[in-house]
Image (cartoon, rainbow, N blue to C red):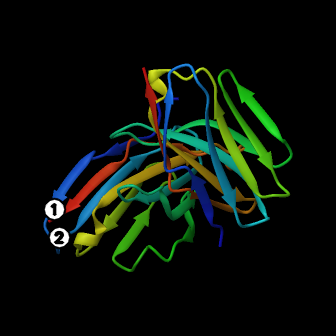
């Protein structure tokens, strides 16, 4: 396993701009999760994919947020019209079929909205 | 939904001593309890996990205990070393619900 990778690692943007993050899961992991972590807090669940199907979305995921996993491999998380409150670490995790609960996290993308 | 509480928020121990971090959960349907270690600027790293059909699990210097009746679980680190200094998170999830609900974290500092 090469590990979960995320790109970019850091993003600074101005309020109102759109941003997109990418996550590449561990190969052959069919489950992919997005979490958000603010300073001093634990990660909070945003959404979850099994293969290309988005199976659950948190109420934290407002209509400005959209996530895709078009071919069941990498995933993207887009935030439109960013707000200062969107500043956080965005974490991606993936899980292996047959061990449905175990989630392995990537290094995260730290977003700062000015 | 699930609510996970974690204590203490900060913990300092002398190198070589033991550290214990405790978590409680609210959803009796929760059946999977992982612990993660997060170092500055990095993503959480899974260090140990336990499922509800087991009361205790050990991996070298790390052990986790689970009390389903009381709905609490604990992380025990023995013979602590400076590299154990990090923020530790507990989490819980229930079968059929894939999301993890995390505690608020414990910042562990090992004093040389």
Q: Residue at x 74, y 53 (%)?
A: B72
Left or right of A23? Residue B96 is right
- For label 1, the crowd category at 10 Å Cα-Cα, with few meaning under 14, some 14 to 19 and many 20 or more, is some
Q: Position of residue A63 (x, y in %)?
A: 38, 80
Which residue is disc 1 drawn over? A13
Disc 1: host chain: A
Query: Foreground residue, B13 or B92?
Result: B13
Asked if labels 2 and 1 touch by Cβ distance under 8 angstroms, the answer is yes
Q: Position of residue B99 (x, y in %)?
A: 61, 60
Disc 2: host chain: A
Residue A61's image quarter?
bottom left
Against B81, residue A55 (above or below) is below
Q: Position of residue A96 (x, y in %)?
A: 63, 42
Query: Foreground residue, B75 or B102?
Result: B75
Against B21, residue A59 (above or below) is below
- For label 2, the crowd category at 10 Å Cα-Cα, with few meaning under 14, some 14 to 19 and many 20 or more, is few
Quadrant the N terminus of chain B occupies: bottom right
Q: Residue at x 43, y 57 (%)?
A: A41
Q: Residue at x 52, y 55 (%)?
A: A33
Distance between mark 1 and mark 2 Cα atoms? 7 Å
- Say whether mark 2 and mark 1 are on the same chain: yes
Which residue is disc 2 drawn over? A17
What label sits on residue A64 in the rendered view? none
Residue A70, visible in the rendered structure: no
Q: Residue at x 22, y 70 (%)?
A: A84
Task: Find numbered disc 1 in the image and state the secondary structure of the residue it sits on.
Answer: strand
Q: Position of residue B59 (x, y in %)?
A: 69, 25
Left or right of A14? Residue B42 is right
């Amino acid at each position: 396993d090469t590990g979960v990778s995320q790109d970019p690692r850091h993003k600074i943007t101005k309020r109102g701009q759109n941003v997109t993050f990418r996550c590449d899961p561990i190969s052959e992991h069919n489950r992919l999760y997005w979490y958000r972590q603010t300073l001093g807090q634990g990660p909070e669940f945003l959404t979850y994919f099994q293969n290309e199907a988005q199976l659950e979305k948190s109420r934290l995921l407002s209509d400005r947020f959209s996530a895709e996993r078009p071919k069941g491999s990498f995933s993207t998380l887009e935030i439109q019209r960013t707000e200062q409150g969107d500043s956080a670490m965005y974490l991606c995790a993936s899980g292996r079929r047959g061990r449905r609960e175990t989630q392995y996290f990537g290094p995260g993308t730290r977003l700062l909205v000015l | 939904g699930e609510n996970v509480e974690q204590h203490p928020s900060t913990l300092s121990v002398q190198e070589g001593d033991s550290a214990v971090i405790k978590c409680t959960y609210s959803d009796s349907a929760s059946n999977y309890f992982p612990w993660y270690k997060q170092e500055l600027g990095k993503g959480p790293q899974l260090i140990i996990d336990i499922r509800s059909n087991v009361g205790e699990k050990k991996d070298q210097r790390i052990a986790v205990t689970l009390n389903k009746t009381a709905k609490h679980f604990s992380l025990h680190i023995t013979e602590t070393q400076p590299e154990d200094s990090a923020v530790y998170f507990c989490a819980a999830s229930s079968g059929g619900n894939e999301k993890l609900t995390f505690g608020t974290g414990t910042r562990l500092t090992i004093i040389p």
